[in-house]
Amino acid sequence: MSKKTIGDQELALLQYIEDAPKSSVAEVVAGYGESRGLARSTVLTMMERLRAKGYLTRRRIDGSFRYSAINGTGEVMTGAVARFVQNTLQGSVSPFVAWMSERGQVSDSELAELEALVDTLQSRREKR
Amino acid sequence: MSKKTIGDQELALLQYIEDAPKSSVAEVVAGYGESRGLARSTVLTMMERLRAKGYLTRRRIDGSFRYSAINGTGEVMTGAVARFVQNTLQGSVSPFVAWMSERGQVSDSELAELEALVDTLQSRREKR
DNA sequence: CATGCTTGACTACAGCTGTCGTCAGGCGCA
DNA sequence: TGCGCCTGACGACAGCTGTAGTCAAGCATG
């Protein structure tokens, strides 16, 4: 089980590649690295590290490598959330709720997601 | 603004102290460090680093120092959540919601918090 | 052929974190 | 008075992350 840690920037990059699979390094540099002022070698290094940790695969296509995320869409993110809640919040969700309520802006769609979540949880509890 | 970064373990420790203010190092070692196999010096170092970053204060009482968190209760945690959502989740809350719904166990009290949150958000929206 | 751009693999390096060991000064008790 | 324990301050070190420069092999082009 690849339980390897993953840094913030690495995660952001991983997310990018998850959204744009089969990208060449050059493409990632253009579409991700350049906008944040990262050198080509930096992007390459991060991608290789992610590959070493088992989050990315690559395949040689037409001479150059194309990288893709291994986990399905969104899995990376939920994994990150799981780790965060576990390691940082000691398993408690309360701080998250507190923050949501403090912070002003919650988009309509987010609110909808939350409502759906509560519904799901409620019915799940009733069934018990 | 003390915008200093803060590691996972450091954060956990900070949270502990937030819940048990005016603790001496010995107390923190006994109540926090020992259970996770940390040496006294480790705990001390972390506490000092937290102090250097501006998250803890200490006052000499009866010879030895007593440490307390500077931020009010919970602020540390919500700050951590804010950073996490911002840096790692790129500002989107969806992964969080997705994870909660995937994960089986949500305690009754957590569910209650979520319900309250949704209520708050709903009424807040209506007022607009 | 000689040059030059593209792609990958390596190497480097500083800053942060997690973890300690150790040293020196006080304090209390035999 | 002397010894041992508690408390703080420092120094150390390895591993991870963020960021990058550089070198060598390939391919394209004049």
Image: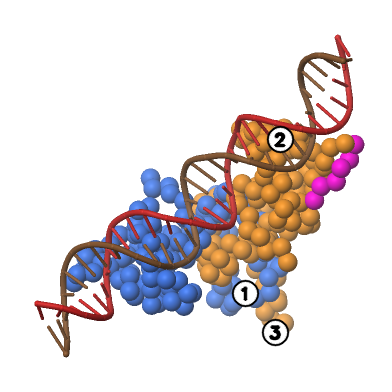
Chain colours: A orange, B blue, C brown, D red
Q: Secondary structure at mark 2?
A: helix
> For mark 2, does the 10 Å Cα neighbourhood hold few (<14), some (14 to 19), or many (20 or more) residues?
many
Q: Secondary structure at mark 3?
A: loop
**Which amino acid is tagged 3?**
Arg
- As drawn, the label of residue A128 is 3
* Front disc: 2 or 1: 2
Q: Is residue A40 left or right of residue B38?
A: right
**Which amino acid is tagged 2?**
Val
Residue in the foreground of this view, choosing between B67 and D30: D30
Span shown in magenta: A57-62
Q: Are marks 3 and 1 in contact (CB under 8 Å)?
A: no
Q: Position of residue C26 (x, y in %)?
A: 16, 69
Q: Residue at x 70, y 55 (%)?
A: A53
- Distance Cα–Cα, label 2 vs label 3: 51 Å
User: What residue is pinned by disc 2?
Assistant: A29
Q: Secondary structure at mark 1?
A: loop
* Front disc: 2 or 3: 2
Q: Position of residue B3 (x, y in %)?
A: 43, 47
Q: Chain of mark 2?
A: A
Question: Does residue A60 show up magenta in the picture?
Answer: yes
Q: Is residue A33 left or right of residue A19?
A: left
- As drawn, the label of residue B106 is 1
Q: Chain of mark 3?
A: A
Q: Position of residue A77 (x, y in %)?
A: 68, 56
| Main SS category, magenta section | strand
